[in-house]
């Protein structure tokens, strides 16, 4: 029993240590989110609740932009849905590593599945086929969300002191994060083509006045064209 | 928008974010998606990120602006380079923000 408790404690500590890079990434972006949320007229409590309940960085920052632009609630929710739909694949990809976990544990795990925690868990996917250590997984996940909430809280506190975010370039945190996440996710030429085509399509739709929906529409078209090209290339090479 | 409507929107966001995170891991221990569906989902992150990114850095005041005054566009290149070479989310974000902050500082000095 004593030995088992030690193993769990060790697992948690290993997890916390592995979350180091995530902490460094989440605190400043969470802070930027907290500051921008204040600018968009969202109360500190609602800002914190978003980081606790939604907990999906890029979609939270997009939502702030939409709140600031006075977008309708339904459009904000639907955009959030489309933006976060990518987690479906991540959730599917890690499921073989969570063998024999209880439903409650899976439910807790799913809430804290972000791009970054997925990246760490999936790195294990490449090196080993053993089931993930439960304590370690929750050590990573809980630490990551704690950093995100702490950053958000810091932003809501600092946000009332900062009157202009421009000198700090906090308004560039979101575009910079997208550039980085996009580059980090691109693995082949079809994806580069999909990224360019979807981006250009989104710009085109925005310019002809398809506001709020341009991201959803362009993404559906872009992903479909990506799959079609992949299938076409596969058939041709057979 | 009042805070109560914002809270309701946040609850909606939480629900539509949680369901896609939960369902696959919850159900997939027994079933699996068709290869076509998996292939399609694999393109979603790249497509969505590009669809959000490009308008945010090339469109200003409802038109395309690739001039030097559009810092968001030009700062994307050093950011991209760091992401590509260093594979670091944090490093890329910091470099992008520093480039924008310095460029604004310099142009403010020149404007004086």
Image (cartoon, rainbow, N blue to C red):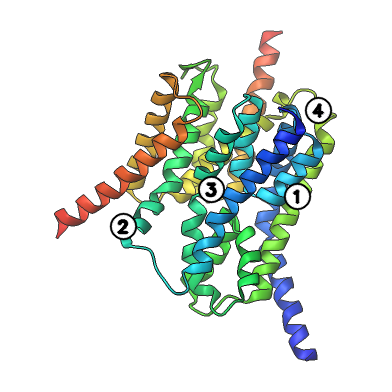
Residue, disc 4:
A162
The reply to whether dot 4 and dot 2 touch (C-beta < 8 Å) is: no
Q: Which structural element holds mark 4?
A: loop
Residue A60: x and y, percent?
Answer: 64, 41
Q: Chain of mark 4?
A: A
Query: Which-is-in-front pick, marks 3 and 1?
Result: 3
Residue A212: x and y, percent?
Answer: 51, 29
Callout 3 and callout 4 share a chain: yes
Callout 4 and callout 1 share a chain: yes
* Distance CA(mark 3)–CA(mark 1): 19 Å
> Is A46 placed left or right of B13 in the picture?
right
Query: Which-is-in-front pick, marks 4 and 2?
Result: 2
> Is A10 placed left or right of B39 in the picture?
right
Q: Which structural element holds mark 2?
A: helix
Residue, disc 3:
A84
The reply to whether dot 3 and dot 1 touch (C-beta < 8 Å) is: no
Nearer to us in this view, B105 or A28: A28
Q: How many residues crowd mark 1 within 10 Å: few (<14), some (14–19), many (20+)? A: many
* Distance CA(mark 2)–CA(mark 1): 37 Å
Q: Residue at x 55, y 16 (%)?
A: B69
Residue, disc 2:
B36
Query: Which-is-in-front pick, marks 3 and 4?
Result: 3
Nearer to us in this view, A15 or A210: A210
* Distance CA(mark 4)–CA(mark 1): 19 Å
Query: Which-is-in-front pick, marks 2 and 1?
Result: 2
Q: How many residues crowd mark 4 within 10 Å: few (<14), some (14–19), many (20+)? A: some
């Amino acid at each position: 029993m004593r030995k088992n408790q030690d193993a769990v404690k060790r697992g948690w500590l290993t997890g916390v240590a592995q979350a180091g890079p995530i902490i460094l990434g989440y605190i400043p972006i969470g802070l930027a989110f907290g500051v921008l949320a204040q600018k968009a007229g969202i109360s500190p409590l609602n800002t914190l609740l978003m980081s606790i309940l939604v907990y999906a960085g890029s979609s939270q920052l997009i939502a702030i932009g939409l709140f600031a632009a006075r977008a309708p609630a339904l459009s904000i929710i639907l955009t959030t849905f489309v933006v976060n739909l990518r987690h479906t694949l991540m959730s599917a990809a890690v499921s073989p590593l969570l063998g024999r976990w209880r439903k409650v544990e899976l439910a807790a795990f799913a809430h804290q599945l972000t791009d970054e925690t997925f990246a760490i868990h999936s790195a294990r996917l490449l090196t080993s086929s053993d089931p993930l250590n439960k304590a370690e997984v929750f050590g990573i996940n809980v630490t990551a969300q704690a950093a995100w909430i702490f950053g958000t809280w810091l932003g809501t506190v600092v946000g009332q002191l900062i009157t202009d975010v421009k000198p700090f370039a906090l308004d560039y945190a979101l575009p910079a994060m997208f550039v980085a996440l996009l580059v980090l996710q691109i693995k082949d030429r079809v994806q580069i083509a999909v990224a360019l085509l979807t981006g250009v399509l989104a710009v085109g739709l925005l310019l002809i006045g398809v506001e709020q929906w341009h991201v959803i529409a362009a993404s559906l078209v872009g992903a479909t064209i990506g799959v079609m090209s992949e299938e076409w290339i596969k058939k041709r090479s057979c | 928008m009042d805070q109560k409507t914002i809270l309701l929107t946040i609850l909606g966001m939480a629900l539509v974010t949680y369901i896609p995170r939960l369902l696959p891991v919850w159900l997939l221990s027994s079933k699996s998606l068709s290869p076509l569906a998996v292939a399609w989902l694999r393109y979603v992150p790249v497509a969505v990120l590009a669809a959000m990114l490009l308008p945010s850095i090339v469109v200003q005041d409802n038109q395309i602006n690739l001039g030097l005054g559009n810092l968001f566009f030009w700062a994307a290149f050093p950011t991209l380079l760091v992401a590509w070479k260093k594979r670091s989310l944090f490093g890329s974000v910091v470099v992008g923000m520093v480039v924008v902050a310095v460029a604004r500082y310099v142009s403010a000095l020149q404007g004086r």
